[in-house]
Amino acid sequence: MADLNAPYRVKGDTGDWEVVVGLEVHAQITATKSKLFSGAATAFGAEPNSQVSLIDAAMPGMLPVPNKECIRQAVRTGMALDAVINRWSRFDRKNYFYADLPQGYQISQLYHPLVGEGEVEILLDDKDESSAKRIGIERIHVEQDAGKLMHDQHPTMSYVDLNRCGVALMEIVSRPDMRSPAEAGAYLRKLRAILRYVGSCDGNMEEGSMRADVNVSVRKPGGDLGTRTETKNVNSVRFVMAVVEHEAKRQVELLESGGAVAQETRLFDPDKGVTRALRSKEDAHDYRYFPDPDLLPLELDEAFLEECRATLPELPDEKRKRYEGLGITPYNASVLTAEVETARWFDDLLESGVEAKAAANWTASELFGALNRIGKSIEDSPVSPPQAAELLKLVADGTISGTIAKQVFEIMLETGEGAGAIVESRGLKQTSDSGEIDAEIDKILAANADKVAEYKAGKQALFGFFVGQVMKAMAGKANPGVVNERLRAKLD
Amino acid sequence: MSELISKTITELRDGFRGGEFSAREIAEGYNTAVEAARLLNAYTVTTPDDALAAADAADETRGQGDLPPLAGIPLGIKDLFATKGVDSTAGSRILKGFKPTYESTVTGNLRRAGAGMLGKLNMDEFAMGSSNETSAYGPVISPWRRKGSNVGLTPGGSSGGSAAAVAALIAPGATGTDTGGSIRQPAAFAGICGIKPTYGRCSRWGIVAFASSLDQAGPMAKTVRDCAILLEAMAGFDPKDSTSLDLPVPQWEANLSSNLSGKRIGIPKEYRIDSVPAEINALWDRGIEWLKDAGATPVEISLPHTKYALPTYYIIAPAEASSNLARYDGVRYGLREEGVKTLDDMYAATRAAGFGAEVKRRIMIGTYVLSAGFYDAYFTKAQRVRALIKQDFAKAFEQCDVILTPTAPSAAFGIGETTDPLAMYLNDVFAVPASLAGLPAMSVPGGLDAQGLPLGLHLIGNELDEQIVLNAGLAIEERAGFTARPEKWW
């Protein structure tokens, strides 16, 4: 396995190159289900042009009115990223012509964004706190999405669907702090997790509620920053990592063959795994940004900010540290907090009063294993937290052994019955009756006289064999502690 | 009938309520007059049935308790207002045939107040102009003529159709909009009253945008009282317009008073311009005397940044317009030029064919001042100067209660006489500063010039103080004794 702490380097003919990555993540504010300035609905997959208000279609005389809930969600997101919330911000118009942009401008925030600097901590190795790295957030601004062109509906014309037009986006701009595909991937996953914890964005990259523009440049380690390219609209963590890897290699090859990296916009082709140029800086639009005169500056008062702060949930990092404090291993704590649904499920399990470490081990191995096998997500888990708690308590109080618990869990998955009922009806209760266990031990020792002799001659390792034989003979129901104790009494 | 159309809104309201005549008689009288005045080109569309329907509704409810304030009053509506199901084209070819599915807040308010609509009034294209000559429908011809001359005169602009309609007695009142003088200058040219309220009093929702930070709707009518009545019905908070003022509408009409004792009238020294005709400055002096007579004390004030107001306006307004007019792209409504290959070609062809020369000029100016490399030198600087101009007024209103100036630097000019755009822009030299500061301002007729054409006096009030503007206007109206009406030649 590669050393996770070794810096990522692109090997070139002239030596090693370092890659520098920054991400601009566009996250749809899905919490509100209505658009940023028009109040029209935003459901995914609706009939084309069925979620378009007069404002979205930019009819003459229409005016935008900010959706306060969108602002609230963006502020909460900023707080979750430990960012400065600007109590005074303003909307600007970004002017350009395109058929998916009815107003002829996008309302965005260039000069005075809602959220300023913040940061996200990523772990490059889930098992190792010391692999933590902070990725700076430069800003978050709120803006409208554009509509969509459909080129496959008519032989000579393109159709326009304005359903997405006016949908609220948060553009979360990172600092160029990432140095490898893995870091870019970890950052995007972490950001997605935080957004989902906060609830501002569902993080659904397939439905386009989250996508990233990937800025990549290369340089000799420690040297000056190189010219960057921006690969637009990358819609999965895997693709983002592929873009970084591909762009870094492409740029190194270009530079080493005497060429220069052009500052340009590129597109990722997921089928071929390559990026290609979309437009160069020379054809870049002059967006003529200026303050939107239809909108007043956004001024946030302390009461509003306080309410935003008060409604923030426990975030992944806090939760992970709390779990670790309960004796849960760093790895399990990391796995259990990576997704908000998992964390919610596990918190419910902890609420039922089970022992944290055992519960974490069981969830991370038994439950995840089973869900993986049956192809279900934790939200659809056939076993609920209270049901799991019942099972774990039976193990904890010695009613059943860990081995029997696995059997019981399988039956729970199949039948939906409760653990207690299964143990009762199928007679799986563990026995600690030393008389019964002694009788079984005697039989085993008698049948394996040769091994007993070997053991007594010093082959200590055979002890486990005798334990296994007794457990097997008792169908796993014997209390392993009692078996151990009685065996030692008889053999030693 | 002709007696009815010469009445003020106040008289029509009181006569209708008192049972002297029916609302239907009023509407029919105006419909007939409108039809007979086609030569003026004041209306782009007439809606006689709309006026009649509102009249019939008023007649039916008369005597059944409280009537809405404008019951029985038909109005002309500037074509910049979206009116449901009726062509709303902003005087532009690019919106030809556009019938909105919605009604602007201001016209909706007027309808709720009982008003009917006589038709849509001609205007400079997208409200860009001071003479009505930029309209895609051709210019409005003012009902006024110079003594002994048949030369067609402009009614001013951009609310030229509104001004001409009120002056020619083909609407008792009309809506206008004012971005940099578009209510006040035509009111002055036509010998009528027109007020632009404080920015934010009237909702901009459903009014085709020219320059969003400056656009304000306001009424145009024969008298100050009529303006107060109409403005009360038009104004009000609208949650659909973020820049709308969330304040109750004052009772301007009930509080009208021409007693100005204790009030100080600011006379800005920077508005004394040598190139302005002597008779305009003489009228200004008469205005000061009238206000003194009403009990006010004149005080000289200084608005030091006045000379920068026009250049500032001609940066900010075109900048906003260049962006506001981007939506007219041929994709969703209005004109679309076919027969071109690419989307960009369609945009170019549509906008080339759909916009007139003045609109194109302003889009280009606006695009230029917002461009990378020029933004700070033009737009940012203009925003700073705008703040200084606001500050000038704030300081001035520490010394005075209302400011008196001439409305325009000339009387109405002939159609085609002013061809230099910069000379045209000078028409608004007195009107623009109040627009940049968002202040209420009004034009009231003061008298006739030597050629027999009306001249207006201009009153500017502090933020939200429309009342002092109206009161000072009333004091002038009572003393000026302006009763001149254009002789009917159409």
Image: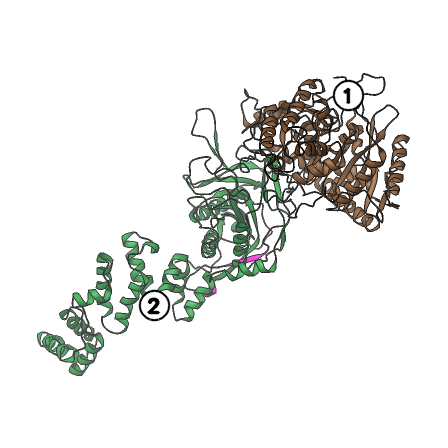
Chain colours: A green, B brown
Residue A72 appears in the rendering: yes
Chain ID of residue with mark 2: A
- Whether discs 1 and 2 lie on one chain: the answer is no
Figure quadrant of residue B416: top right
Chain ID of residue with mark 1: B
In reply to whether residue B18 is colored magenta, the answer given is no
Residues in magenta?
Answer: A111-130
Figure disc tally: 2
Q: How far apart are marks 1 and 2 (CA)?
A: 87 Å
In-image side of A369 versus A344 (left or right): left
Q: Which amino acid does label 2 sit on?
A: Ser
Crowding near the residue tagged with mark 1, few <14, some 14–19, many ≥20 C-alpha atoms within 10 Å: many
> Is B106 placed above or below B4 here?
below
Residue B356: x and y in percent read 67, 24
Quadrant where the image shows the N terminus of chain B = top right
Q: What residue type is labelled 1?
A: Ile
The residue tagged with tag 1: helix, strand or loop? loop
**Residue at image location 63% in from the left, 33% down from the top:** B115
Mark 2 sits on what residue?
A352
Residue B91 appears in the rendering: no
Q: Nearer the viewer, mark 1 or mark 2?
A: 1
Residue B402: x and y in percent read 81, 44
Mark 1 sits on what residue?
B415
